Each structure stands twice: as structure tokens, then as C-alpha cells.
Amino acid sequence: MRTLAQLSALVGGTVTGDASTVIHGVASIENAVPGTIVFADGERSFSLAVASAASAIVAPASCNSGPKPLVHVANPKLAFARMVAELVPSRAVERRVHETAIVDESATIGTGVAIGAWSTVGPGSSVGDGTVIGSGCSIGAGVRIGPDGVVHPNVTIYDGVRIGNRVVVHAGAVIGADGFGFVADGGQFHKFPQVGDVRIGDDVEIGANSTIDRGALDSTVIGDGTKIDNLVQIAHNVRIGRNCVIAAQTGISGSTTIEDGVMLGGQVGVADHVRIEAGAVAGAQAGIPSGKIIRKGTMVWGTPARPMSEFRKVFALVQNLPSLKSRVGELERRLTEIDKKTS
């Protein structure tokens, strides 16, 4: 429970209306009740928020009228997220090593660490101060996990993986499995040794059931601040820069380089040896062929991926194919009639 003045101070906002309004919780606009706060990021959502049962609204400065108290901020959704963290605190975790966990005697466990039931920590591994390891996790040999991270249940981290500070790994993720590397010989395939590692920077989040393969000879690298959704596959020797966003069911093939600030929509397919330069965006289900370079700041879509302006032209033509087919059919019919008459 906080007053609107306290919440506004937390996010650096400005209150319009009764700053002493008491807020008990947060809600969506559709399910708001008295005592909750909602956010609006445009005129349409602001109108809906004003009509809702919420007691207050987080809104941009352009939305400056209405019967409810407002907190004006530059980025309502970001400010609201910080309020959620304040009003809905995380569940308290008992900071202990569960009696069923198996921690190798050569492993180093920091202070304030929690390790859940039936988890294992291999020889020579270390878990930083304040990190939480959920139940059923398998942490191999020589793994390094930085402080203040969260590894949710049933995560598998293979030998030699390096994970930075404040990293969140969601349930079922697998980090450091062998890359998909084979050498053909007379119709048979021989495994190419996968002896590299995985290096994950600070403040990274890895979604449920995502997989990050170790490098074949070098490292697979995930840069600071990058956010990876559920069900994402990142192959061996991929290098991803800082503050990238990768949506669900995206697959990134081996030896691809993704520079800082790139955004990949859902189900994007990236073939091997691709370079995606800083700030580029690939729309959902885009397909990027082997060896292609997506230039800095470009937005691409479609398969094969092409700049948005070009994609729109092609898409418009494809949409007109049914009517074009009908017109061609009509022309063929008329030509056939002319041929009959002239013959």
C-alpha cells in the first residue's frame, strides 16, 4: 500500500489531482477495481482508463484531464512496471541449501544463496551471493553463476558455462548443450567436437525451454541486457550483442553475429553466418538466408527477408494475384472467342 505521492516519487513523475490517494494494487484497465492503479500510453487507452474503476492512472503528459488523479511520466509502461515491483513484491525465498540438493565439496556457494530440492551443483562450480537456484536444476562442472541471479526449476547448465550478474533463467532452459555440428563422409555423418563454451553477460533474461548451444571451438556469447523469450534456439558460435530482444520460437543458426540493440520478432529464422547490424529489426516469421548482412537500423520482413518498403510492394502484388488470375482468365476466354470467329 502506497500513496500516489510515494509512487510518483518512485518513478520521477508529477501528480495531477489528489496525491494522498492510497493505492493498494495494480490492475489492467479491463479488471481495475477501486484502490488500484492502471497505465495508459495513448488517447484511446486513456479514455478507457478514465472510464474504469481504477483509483489513479499513469499517463503521458498529453493526457492531462479527467476525474481521476494522474501520474504524468515520459514512459507510462516503464513507470507502471516499477510500481508493480513496489506494490507486488516477489515471494520470499528461504535462503538455504535444501537437504536433498547435492553440492560437490569443491563447489563455492556464496552467502544468501538458495538451492532447491533435488538440484545438483558440479565440481569446481560457483554460485554468487544472493542467487536462487530452483528445484530440479542440474549445474555441471566448472560453471560460474554471478550474484543476485535466479535459475528457475528444471534448468540444465552444462560444464564450463559462464553466467553474469543478475541473470534470470526460466524453467526448462538448457545452456551449453553441444552444437549441431557434423562432418559428412560417404553418406555418414561424424560429430564435430563441441569443445567451446557459453558466456552470458549481466542482466540477461532467458525464457522457458530456450536452448543456447556451446561453441564448437570458441564461445557462444550473449551480451549484457539481452532478453530472450521462450522456445528460442541459439546455435553454436553465435554472438549476440547488448540489449537485444529475441521473441519466441526464433531460431538462430551457427556462427551468426547479432550486434547491439537488434530486435527479432516471433518465429524469425536466421540461417548460418548471417550478420545483423546494430539496431536492425526483423518482423515476425522473417527468414534471413545464409551469409546475408542486414544493415544497421534496417527493418526487414518476409522470406527471404527484405527491407520493409520493398516487402510492402511485393506483398501488395501477392494480394492482387486472385484478381489478376481472374482478369487473365477473362482475357483468355475473349481471345478464344476471337480465334473462333476469325477461323
Image (cartoon, grey):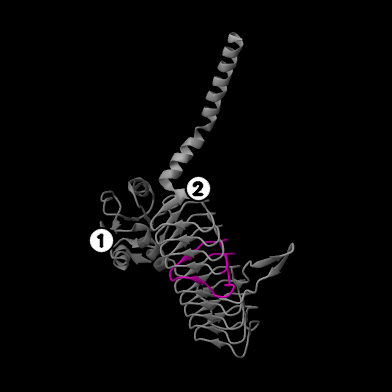
* Quadrant containing the C terminus in the rendered view: top right
Quarter-of-image position of residue 104 = bottom right
Which residue is under mark 1? 14
Which residue is under mark 2? 302
- How far across and down, in percent of the image, does residue 161 sit? 56, 77
Q: Which mark is residue 299?
A: none
Disc nearer the start of the sequence (2/1): 1
Looking at the image, which residue sits at the far front?
343
Quarter-of-image position of residue 298 = bottom left
Which residue is pictured at 50% across the width and 32% down the height? 320
Q: Nearer the viewer, residue 335 or 118?
A: 335
> Please, what is the three-letter code of the amino acid marked with disc 1?
Thr
- How far across and down, in percent of the image, does residue 112 sit? 50, 84
* Quadrant containing the N terminus in the rendered view: bottom left
234 part of magenta stretch:
yes
**Badge 1: how crowded within 10 Å, few (<14), some, or many (20+)?**
some
> Please, what is the three-letter code of the amino acid marked with disc 2?
Gly
**Callout 1: helix, strand or loop?**
strand
Q: Magenta stretch: give its range.
A: 207-236
**Callout 2: helix, strand or loop?**
loop
173 part of magenta stretch:
no
Label 2, label 1: how many angstroms apart (C-alpha)?
43 Å
Which residue is pictured at 61% across the width and 77% down the height? 195
**Badge 2: how crowded within 10 Å, few (<14), some, or many (20+)?**
many
Q: Is residue 256 above or below residue 59?
A: below
Q: Nearer the viewer, residue 36 or 164?
A: 164
Mark 2 vs mark 1: give the one in front. Answer: 2
- How far across and down, in percent of the image, does residue 209 sit? 59, 64
- How far across and down, in percent of the image, does residue 158 sit? 61, 76
The answer to whether 316 appears left or right of 186 in the picture is: left
Q: Is residue 1 above or below residue 324?
A: below
